[in-house]
Amino acid sequence: MLRYIMKRFLMMIPVILGITFIIFAIMNFTPGDPAKLILGEEATAEDVAKLRTELGLDDPFLVRFARYVINAVQGDFGTSYRNRQPVFNEIFDRFPTTFKVAFFGILIAVFIGVPIGILSAVKQYSIIDTISTIGAMLLTAMPGFFVGMLLILLFALKLNILPATGISSWKHFVLPSLAVASVTMATFIRMTRSTMLEVIRQDYVRTARAKGASESRIVFRHCLRNALLPIITVIGMNFAHQLGGTVMIEAVFAIPGLGSHMVTAVRQKDTPVVMASIIFVAVVAGLMNLLVDILYTYIDPRVKTQYTKG
Amino acid sequence: MMSEPILKIENLHVIYKTDESTVYAVNGVDLELFSGETLGLVGETGAGKTTTALSIMRLLPDKIGKVVHGSITLEGTDVLTATEADMRLLRGSTVSMIFQDPMTSLNPTITVGNQIGEVLYLHRPGISHADIEAGVDNILEMVGIPAGRKNDYPHQFSGGMKQRIVIAIALACEPKLLLADEPTTALDVTIQAQVLEMMNELKDKLDTSMILITHDLGVVAQTCDKVAIMYAGEIVEYGTAEDVFNGKNKHPYTKGLFGSIPDFTKKAYRLSPIEGLMPDPTDLPAGCKFHDRCPYCMDICRTQNAPAIREGSHMIRCHLMAAGGKGEAWE
Amino acid sequence: MSTAGKAKRRKRSQLSLIWFRFRKNKLAMLGLIIFLMMIFMAAYVSIFGDYEKAITMDMPNKLQTPSAAHLFGTDQFGRDILMRMMFGARISLSVGLLTMVLSLVVGSLIGAAAGYYGGKVDNLLMRIMDVFLAIPSTLLAISIVAALGQGMFNLLLATAVSQIPAFARVVRSAILTVKGQDYIEAARACGMRGGRIILRHILPNAMGPIIVQATLNIARTILGISSLSFVGLGISPPTPEWGSMLSEGKTMMRYYPHLILIPGAAIALAVMSLNLIGDGLRDALDPRLKN
């Protein structure tokens, strides 16, 4: 098992390196001079030229890329062009906020979406199924930030029971989490329904029926665990995605999260911040996938055998 | 004096109805089975054998499969009108079913011990945990698997072993009737014989009646007391094994089935398989359903359903028999 | 009848069977009708109104609630919201379609090469696709727009890049399924070359999943464009675009909720109709997958 985890860590390296390269290349094309950005508009040409040499900005692209990677491996991801602070300071400052929104959002989505999906599959073609299918369809079609605006309109502006923007109390997290939950919930409903329907058709479920097991026993004891694998994958993927910070939802609720941080950095050509944030997000996503895979082994004995062997 | 049969099926009609078509799977089947008997249900794929068995369990695919006509009486219970709760009590205890493919018939996330124990738990109200464990050990030993392996998962067993476990599940509550749907088809030939022999022994030991669904006439000859030959949802020939294998008359389809088996005692240059395919079950022909493949087809066969002609325990559904049995085309 | 004729007839009857199944799916038909109406609206909106009117300010008439003259009211610059919404359809649908075509072509080529040649080519190409998939799509699009500058074409490019891996995967797996089948072996035995086999034999058979993916991708692109415009990186005002309409309406939504409800509903309708069509097509193409 430990060997498997190690192997997975090693497999993450080339992906992260690839991401680093792509983003580095894109940022390289972005117009604007970082030296000017640091020194301000009034800086003299000599000062700018001096700083450019200092930062190594005049070196060829590949040299700069190699230097970045070598430094990064040693833990030095550079300093922000904006505030000259180490890039991870602000990332770590903002991550807890993003994490809270993502975590509560996913939590709500799981606790509402998965049961609805199960019910919808078990009572296929019933009224419950139709309503939940249509509901999921509507939610998938609405952009998260639009749902966010509707929530603000209803709960903050009309009913005046929850704050619309900011992060100063737990109440502030309710609406953003609901907005995050809305879209992911739709995915969970659809996913749970279709995997459950697939599992219900399996031969071993017929065997359970032939034993005389009741419907609820069949659903909870025989189907759920088998359906859990793909559901957990989707939950993990969505969680990882949300941990990167959703730019639009952060914009709607004025949340100082990772997403808005990255957008600001991209627009300001603050390359070190962009690089570090994206690498951070990619690592978090990779770890999340690994976590999901480890969870698999506790759910499906077949996966466990496979891993302990290899 | 015969006692009451364990199973009595009368004039059973089953259809599968989807948006696009209606499949006439079973078209008027009559069957009787007495305690301890083994009935071989023989026919090609799609002849309605499995559908008949699923109807007895009342496990036809939800919303698609439907019994449109007829009755099934199992141990005095009218299966088609019983409540779902009553049916659940019957399933697994009075009647059990072994499905075709052992690879997919076991739940991959539950230990085999728990899967066998579940039947005991469901049908022996108030049974203690220790008794369930003991029961599982006992039945595992009976099917030839060391009890020590009960905590393993299905994927850790071979195909033959899995089928033994499926059989263990089916027999755990000592059912009156066992429905075995091609229990050995998915297994290696060498293992087929072993599993079949084991099933027979257990069946005799537990005094269970059995319907053995198969398309292997060799298996039928070895194990069955009675044989029903199914074609396009009908039983075209029915009788004791002696009647069907050695009787003086045969349904042309049965003859064809025998012709498809290599007989090493005769010097023959080629097998004589039945020409053509089974009719499309969504669009069955008028008259005798076998007429377009029948080498002895007469005009009447194309328009009128074949009558069931009985001679003692032997039934043949064929116009030829009605026309005097040994017409010139017959032999 | 010749064999070719028979094959053709079977092909046609299969198409009509797909259409038959699709037509029986009420939700899918609803989606198709909504989508066709949107296309019609986008194509012929100029008949109903003048584009100039949709972008020029008319301050005396600002923030009107729905009336006979302005069916959906006007925005804070006095522009008719209905007109802006209809012209917005033109942008969303055309960018959506073009993005789909672009990512479809590039993605299919990559997927086809990976699936057909297999081995090292497959490994290399698919790892590159994995890298692209690992970058959050909004962020990738934002970086590309930032690098290339704002504008319709750059936006198109930016959204297309993040959609390429999905197509590559679909095409690759479709090809892997078809590849092992006998008629491909037969074609190869007849001396057909790789590229020709892909074009003549494999792609037509992989068409089903590709079409489904394409439909769903237009929906995703429409969402993506509106998101980018919403944070000010997509289509810039005064061009009518649903996302930027939402962004503009945001400040006023307390008193004039119709400013956001109309463009939001337009996005939702467009995306939903495409999702319905996509799901319906998938079921019609392969009824076994139907739930």
Image (cartoon, helix red, strand yellow):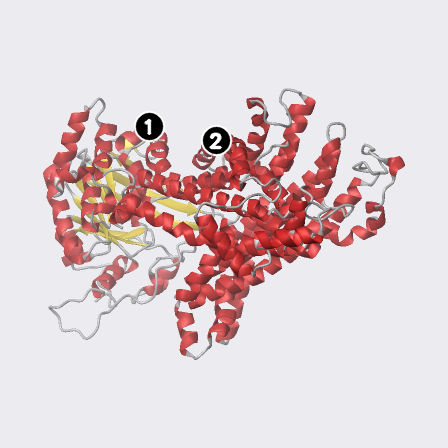
Residue type, numbered disc 1: Ala
- In space, the residues marked 2 and 1 are separated at their CA atoms by 37 Å
Q: How many marks?
A: 2
- The residue pinned by badge 1 equals B85
Q: Could you say which quadrant of the image residue B55 lies in?
A: top left
C190 left or right of B239 in image: right
Mark in the foreground, 2 or 1: 2
Q: In the rendered structure, find residue B282 and report the number of the disc placed on it.
A: none
Compared to residue A188, the image places residue A57 above or below, namely below
Residue C256, percent across and down? 76, 30
Q: Amino acid at mark 2?
A: Leu
Nearest the camera: B53 or C80? C80
- Quarter-of-image position of residue A154: top right
Q: Say whether residue A98 is visible.
A: no
Left/right of residue C96 with respect to residue B115 in the rendered view = right
Q: Residue at (49%, 57%) from the top-left corner?
A: A66
Q: Secondary structure at mark 1?
A: helix
Q: Chain of mark 2?
A: A
Coordinates of residue A252 in the picture (x, y in percent)? 65, 34
Q: Is residue A60 above or below residue A238?
A: below
Q: State which quadrant residue A199 falls in.
A: top left
Residue A191 in sight: yes
Q: Residue furthest bottom?
A: C191
Disc 2 target residue = A107
Q: Considering depth in this image, is A104 or A69 the residue closer to the camera?
A: A69
Is B279 located above or below residue A130 in the figure? below
Q: Locate residue B57, reporting x and y percent.
A: 30, 38
Mark 1, other Cα within 10 Å: few <14 / some 14–19 / many ≥20: few
